[in-house]
Amino acid sequence: MSFSVKGKTAIVTGAANGIGLAIARQFADRGANVMCADMDEKKLAAEWGDQPDDAPLRYFAGDLRQRLTIANLVSATIDAFDRVDILVNASRQVMPTDALDVEDTSVEVLLEQNLMTALQLTQQVAKRMIRQGKDQPEGQLGSIINLSSIVSRTTRPELMGYSIASAALEQMTRSMALALAPERIRVNAVAFGSVMSASLKSSVVENSEWREDIRNHTPMGRIASPTELADAVQFLAADSSGFMTGEIITVDGGRSLLDVVAAPAH
């Protein structure tokens, strides 16, 4: 059983900050070719710009809510590395919802950012993987991993939009897993609790009580590092999970086993 991603080509979205950045770095460190995608071109350049021309790393800046941008991202990956084997939909947005405000647009915004972007990119990448498979009669053709949240199952009113989008992403994962299984493409997701992402780090620095609240409501008593989430993603990307599809792996230190969700999972 191999946990290796060496020699494979991965697209990682949200790769300018936090969790997406950690996943992209880990894949690159383990020998994968990585296309790092994000809307923040300045941050992408700061993290990934200083690379030799033949480096197994590229970055792509653009708004992935646009279909043309998605098509350009896939084309740029093929131009750089000739193929794509792994897609990690790590780009996501967290924002509060006023559940009783009819003018609140957070549900629409989060469905567009956290669900539709992942769905449309999955569709485009899967088409490319299927074309690659014409010359590869055996073995799996690709692995697609979505990043979700435990708030898909347990929520609070102010997290309604994020919860709805996360639950929809998990159902999309299952549906696409069934659609793509005959094509030898696996689709799985990681639902996580509190991980020290860029947004959570800034929040807990400003509010030490929030940090303690998260720890008190996590049985393992701490906040996970982005590397721990990257390990789970690598497992799903590698041949080690070759007979897994449509699964939602929970990485939350036991937090979703409790009845009460404290501070939002990030």
Image (cartoon, grey):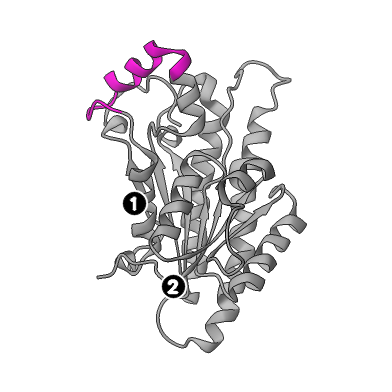
Residue at 44 percent across and 18 percent down: it is 205
Out of 244 and 37, give the one closest to the viewer.
37
Image quarter (top left, top right, bottom left or bottom right) of the C terminus: top left
Picture coordinates of residue 122, whole percent (x, y): 58, 60
Horizontal relation, residue 165 to residue 251: left or right: right
Q: Is residue 225 above or below residue 155?
A: below
Q: Position of residue 28 (x, y in %)?
A: 45, 59
Between 111 and 138, the one nearer to me in the picture: 138
Mark 1 Cα shell of 10 Å, populated few (<14), some (14-19), many (≥20): some
For badge 1, the amino acid type reads Asp
Residue 197 percent across, percent down from the top left? 46, 34
Is 210 magenta? The answer is yes
For the residue marked with disc 2, what is the amino acid?
Gly
Magenta span main SS: helix
Residue farthest along the left direction in this orientation: 220
Looking at the image, residue 153 lies above or below residue 181:
above
Q: Find disc 1 in the rendering and name its residue.
A: 231
Label 2, on which residue? 7
Dot 2 or dot 1, earlier in sequence: 2
Residue range of the region highlighted in magenta in the rendering: 205-222
Distance between mark 2 and mark 1 Cα atoms: 17 Å
Q: Give percent across and percent down for residue 258.
A: 27, 26
Q: How many marks?
A: 2
